[in-house]
Image: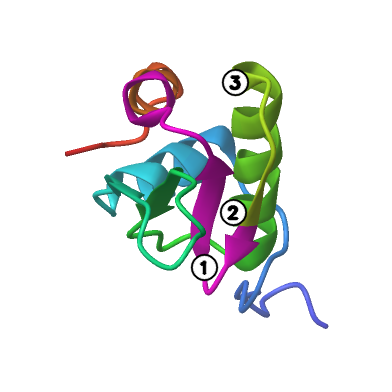
Amino acid sequence: MGKNSSRVLVYSTSASATDQQNSKQQHRLWLRTERKGRGGKTVTIIGGFTIPADAIHELARRLKSACGIGGSVVDNEIVLQGQVREKAAALLRQWNYPVH
């Protein structure tokens, strides 16, 4: 490239803290508890994500650790074992995720 050539960034895998904060604010997460079809056991389901799947898995890991429970990610929704809706909502708000 010559001195007068302009460079244009087409794609970057690095995300700044501002970009990560903006991506959190672009979605509104919802939480619900459910028992139907689960053998009478209650689960808390969190959905509405617009972040990549690996970020959802990392968030699920943090939530499970903070709540001291098990869970998984199914179809881009976090499924937490037990009725932890209020605790999960408080943690998500603390981590700057918009929850309604």
Could you say which disc has been placed on residue 41 in the image? Answer: none
**Pointer 1 residue:** 76
Kind of residue at badge 3: Cys
User: Is the image coloured rainbow, by chain, by secondary structure, or in one colour?
Assistant: rainbow
From the top left corner, tell me how far across and down residue 21 is, in percent: 43, 37
**In which quadrant will I find the C terminus?**
top left
Q: Residues within 10 Å of mark 1 (few under 14, many from 20)?
A: some
Q: Is residue 7 magenta?
A: no
- From the viewer's side, name the closer residue of 23 and 70: 70
Residues at circles 1 and 2 in contact by the CB criterion of under 8 Å? yes
Residue stretch rendered in magenta on the structure: 73-88
Q: Quadrant of residue 9?
A: bottom right
Residue at 35% across / 62% down in the picture? Answer: 36
Could you say which disc has been placed on residue 56 in the image? Answer: 2
Kind of residue at badge 2: Ile
Kind of residue at badge 1: Asn
**Pointer 3 residue:** 67
From the top left corner, tell me how far across and down residue 42 is, in percent: 44, 43
45 vs 27, left or right, is right
Q: Element at badge 1?
A: loop
Q: Earlier in the sequence, mark 3 or mark 1?
A: 3
Q: CA distance from mark 1 to mark 2?
A: 7 Å
